[in-house]
Image (tube, rainbow, N blue to C red):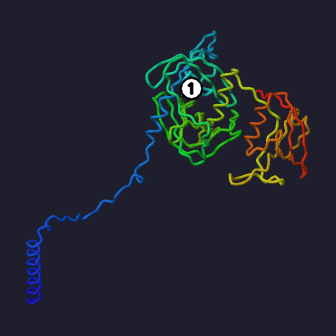
């Protein structure tokens, strides 16, 4: 044991002596420093994602909308009026003063005011409203209005990140984040929502009518509402009106004060073949619109269309979705003739139908 300790101490002494000599001969070794732990390097690509620039581009154009209306109190034995106040949001669409908001935000309002993010309060005039798409156009007279960034060629995709900007519960401008989960939802509620975008960016009372923008701050839709079913607690499903639809409706409201649409009185599903197999994914090719119901005494019924017929073309136009087919019909002047190319029991037929105005 004593020999082992002597050997160990002797080795340590030789080692220290050698280290001392090396330090004398190579003094630069004194400057070397080796950290015990090395922090992982973080590249810019690994940094947290921020949407601050998108918010800076879009947020100034999102306004608060305040409405007042006078109602007769039904609970009063004597005729008595009460004043109701509502709030929502709106989007400045042009420097000329046109603002988009929701129909349900301004419905029945006697007085409408908007508040800009720069502190200005302006009285707004209702230009027109469309219940079917839940849109309304307001007008304000002011200079230097911030306008929301827009791109008519933009084609939002499922999975895109979106930001909902509005004034929920009158707490001040708030931004919520989500992704687009579906495009073109039809008939999902009793209000008759058409061609609506579905996403999970939260929309609360006061957010309606605000802007839904992408990660660059470009407008992709107008916030509409949460999906609700009676006696069911549903979370994470919210609707927005796609930008192209909102822009189209806005132009008609500005020009005519209302939106006139045609219809045939049919309901249908997208199918991928003559057998009527439903289209279930975006990767499939649309064959046509299979009619699932024909309204009695409607234009389609009078023209002889039947359940099971598959519409292939409308006035010689092919379509790539049910919504596009409905839009082609809707854009036709009421009481005009259109030619439908259909597949009936594997035979192609041409049927003429007279459109009618769609009334709510």
Q: Position of residue 332 (x, y in %)?
A: 79, 31
> Looking at the rendering, which quadrant does residue 261 occupy?
top right
Residue appearing at x 8%, y 88% in the figure: 2
Examine the rendered structure and indicate whether residue 124 appears above or below residue 280.
above
Residue 160 picture location, percent across and down: 56, 46
Number of other residues with Cα within 10 Å of mark 1, as a class: few under 14, some 14 to 19, many 20 or more: some
**Looking at the picture, does residue 336 appear above or below residue 161?**
above
Q: Quadrant of residue 86?
A: top right
Q: Quadrant of residue 109?
A: top right
Q: Helix, strand or loop at disc 1?
A: loop
Tell which of 6 and 161 is nearer to you.
Answer: 161
Of the 4 image quadrants, the one containing the C terminus is top right
Across and down, in percent, residue 320 comes to: 74, 46
- Expressed as whole percent of the image width and height from the top left, the position of residue 23 reads 10, 71
The residue that label 1 is drawn on is: 94
* In-image side of 279 versus 178 (left or right): right
Front in this rendered view, residue 21 or 34: 21
Residue at x 82%, y 43% (from the top left corner) = 313
Image-based side of 149 in relation to 1, left or right: right
Q: Give the total of numbered labels.
A: 1
Q: Quadrant of the N terminus?
A: bottom left
Residue drawn at the location 72% of the way across and 26% of the way down: 259
């Amino acid at each position: 044991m004593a020999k082992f300790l002597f050997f160990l101490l002797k080795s340590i002494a030789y080692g220290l002596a050698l280290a001392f000599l090396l330090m004398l001969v190579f003094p630069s070794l004194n400057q070397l420093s080796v950290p015990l732990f090395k922090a992982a390097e973080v590249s810019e690509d690994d940094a947290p994602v921020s949407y601050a620039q998108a918010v800076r581009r879009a947020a100034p154009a999102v306004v608060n909308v305040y409405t007042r209306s006078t109602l007769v109190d039904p609970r009063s034995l004597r005729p008595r009026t009460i004043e109701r106040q509502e709030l929502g949001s709106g989007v400045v669409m042009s420097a000329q003063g046109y603002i988009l908001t929701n129909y349900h935000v301004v419905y029945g309002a006697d007085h409408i005011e908007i508040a800009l993010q720069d502190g200005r309060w302006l009285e707004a005039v209702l230009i027109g409203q469309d219940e079917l798409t839940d849109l309304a156009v307001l007008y304000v007279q002011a200079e230097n209005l911030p306008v929301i960034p827009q791109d008519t060629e933009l084609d939002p995709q499922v999975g895109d990140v979106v930001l909902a900007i509005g004034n929920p519960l009158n707490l001040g401008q708030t931004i919520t984040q989500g992704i687009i989960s579906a495009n073109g939802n039809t008939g999902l509620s009793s209000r008759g929502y058409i061609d609506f975008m579905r996403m999970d960016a939260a929309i609360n009372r006061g957010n309606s009518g605000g802007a839904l923008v992408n990660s660059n701050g470009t407008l992709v839709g107008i916030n509409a509402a949460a999906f609700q079913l009676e006696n069911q607690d549903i979370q994470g499903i919210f609707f927005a009106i796609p930008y192209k639809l909102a822009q189209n409706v806005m132009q008609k409201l500005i020009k005519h004060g209302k939106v006139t649409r045609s219809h045939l009185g049919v309901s249908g599903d997208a199918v991928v073949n003559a057998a009527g197999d439903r289209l279930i994914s975006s990767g499939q090719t649309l064959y046509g619109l299979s009619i699932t119901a024909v309204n009695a005494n409607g234009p389609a019924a009078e023209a002889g269309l039947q359940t099971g017929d598959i519409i292939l073309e409308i006035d010689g136009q092919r379509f790539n979705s049910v919504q596009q087919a409905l839009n082609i019909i809707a854009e036709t002047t009421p009481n005009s003739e259109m030619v439908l190319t259909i597949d009936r029991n594997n035979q192609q037929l041409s049927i003429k139908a007279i459109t009618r105005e769609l009334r709510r």
